Structures are given as C-alpha cells and as structure tokens.
Amino acid sequence: MGLLDGKKGLVVGVANERSYAYYIAKALTEAGATCAYTHLPGEKNERRTKRAVTPVSGDDAWMRPLDASSDDEIDTVFDEYAKSFDRMDFLVHSIAFADREWLAAGKFTDTPRDAYLGAVDISAYTLAAMSKRARPLMDKSGGGSILCMSYYGGDKVVPGYNVMGVAKAALECTARYLASELGEQNIRVNSISGGYLRTLASSAVGGTDTMGETAAQKAPLRRATEGEDVGGTAVYLVSDLSKGVTGETIFVDCGINILGA
C-alpha cells in the first residue's frame, strides 16, 4: 500500500530529469499516485519531457502541450484531463519565466515593463489561472492539494534573481489568497520554497555558478538541497498527513533561509 494510492493529478513543469517537477512526479508516483503531464509546445520540448517521464509513468504517460500564457490552451489541457481521468486530487505548478537578459546583478532597475509583467504573468498569475480550472475537478473529488514551487529570492534579495524574485513573492501571495478562497471546498494550496538546484531555469540567473557549493558550506545541514528533498515534501503535502496545512510556504533548503548572512 502506498501513501498516495488512488490519487491522480496533473504535474505542470517537467522540463527534464533535473527539474524539481521531475523529482516531485517521481516521488508522487513511487507513493502510488498517477501523474499526468504538460510540456512546452514544440517537438523538442515534447521529446525532452517524454524522456524524463517515461521511466516514471511509462511509455503511455498522459502528456499535452501547454503554452501557459494562453487561457485557451489552459482550458484545453484541463478539459482533456477531465475527459481522461475521473478525478483530480492534486495539481503541481512548477513553471516560471523571466527574460534572462534582466537576470543579472545590477540589471533590476532597468527591467522594462514588458519583461516585468511577463515574469509575473507566467510565474505567478498562471497559478491562479490553473487553480480556477482545477477547482471544479477537485470539488468533485472531495477536495485536493495544489502545490507551487517558489524560491528564497522571493523573500530576500538574491543578487541577479531580480524580477524573478518579484514574481516568486507574487506567487506565494497568490497561493495564500487561493488557500483562503478554496478552503471551503477542502482544497489546500501551499508553496514549496526549494533550495538552489542546477536546472534549465536556474542556469539563466547570473551569478548562480557557486550557489550549490556555498549552500553546502553554509547550510545548517552542510549540504546542498537535492531533488528528492522536495519530492518527499510534495508527497507529504499531497497526502492526508498534511490535511490541516494550507496557505503555507515550506522551505526545503537544508536551512539556508534561517541564516542572517
């Protein structure tokens, strides 16, 4: 018997085998859950996501393309999910975007309006947009768990993180407001603030090359965060073990966030 036997849901954001979404999907599946997936549009992105999820969910894993900037595409994904699955117990939102030109130390003040708004749209608003579509599906299932991925740069200044920090702060606040409104339907919404992990997204931020090494030296646990750490936390948040937890930002960063410097 697995902790998540019988639970089904959608994981948005598996880019490859190094993404946090991959580790979350792997942990959820190993605990007994069934995961469906989206991938960025394009054959290359589809192949990359399929290569990552096949060892986790098999060759026939449910996958659909999604441009999260389009409400029509979000509608299509959730409509097709509802036709393929009889319930939605969880939604994992693990996407973010910012123009890498502005992700460098000293660039924040010059961030143009379109880059600023685009980062907030994809990184934060999409959580609200997807939660809106997930709401009726979870309500039919008697409730559910919505997770999103944040980072310490939304709480404190991380050099070079810039507009992504603004977007992550908006994401965490969005999660809290969603938690307040969706609680009546037994839908919980929480953020996981994972420590630095070398991914496609993090590689776009200037000055991150030494962050893993620095974390290993300074973190209270004296190691860098691993994908499995976040995967395990996701299992807890999807399971009934966390049935009284909502609106929280849970740090999974080996303790880096508690340090003063």
Image: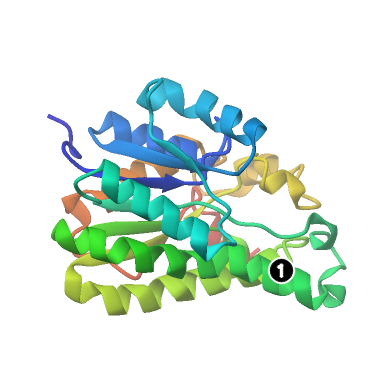
Residue shown at 37% from the left, 39% from the top = 36
> Label 1, on which residue?
163
Q: How many marks?
A: 1
Q: Position of residue 197 (x, y in %)?
A: 60, 42
Element type where label 1 sits in the image: helix
Q: As drawn, is 104 to the left or to the right of 172?
A: right
Residue shown at 38% from the left, 57% from the top = 147
Give whichever of 105, 170 is nearer the camera.
170
Q: Quadrant of the C terminus?
A: bottom right
Q: Callout 1 environment at 10 Å: few (<14), some (14 to 19), or many (20+)?
A: many
In the figure, 110 relative to 126: above or below? below
Look at the image and tell me whether residue 258 can be seen.
no
Residue shown at 76% from the left, 62% from the top = 159
Residue shown at 28% from the left, 46% from the top = 83
Q: Position of residue 195 (x, y in %)?
A: 55, 49
* Quadrant housing residue 6: top left
Q: As drawn, is 42 to the left or to the right of 68?
A: right
In the figure, 261 relative to 92: above or below? below
Q: As drawn, is 177 to the left or to the right of 1?
A: right
Look at the image and tell me whether residue 9 can be seen.
yes
Q: Position of residue 232 (x, y in %)?
A: 35, 41
Q: Position of residue 74 (x, y in %)?
A: 47, 58
In the figure, 60 relative to 98: above or below? above
Q: As drawn, is 135 to the left or to the right of 11?
A: left
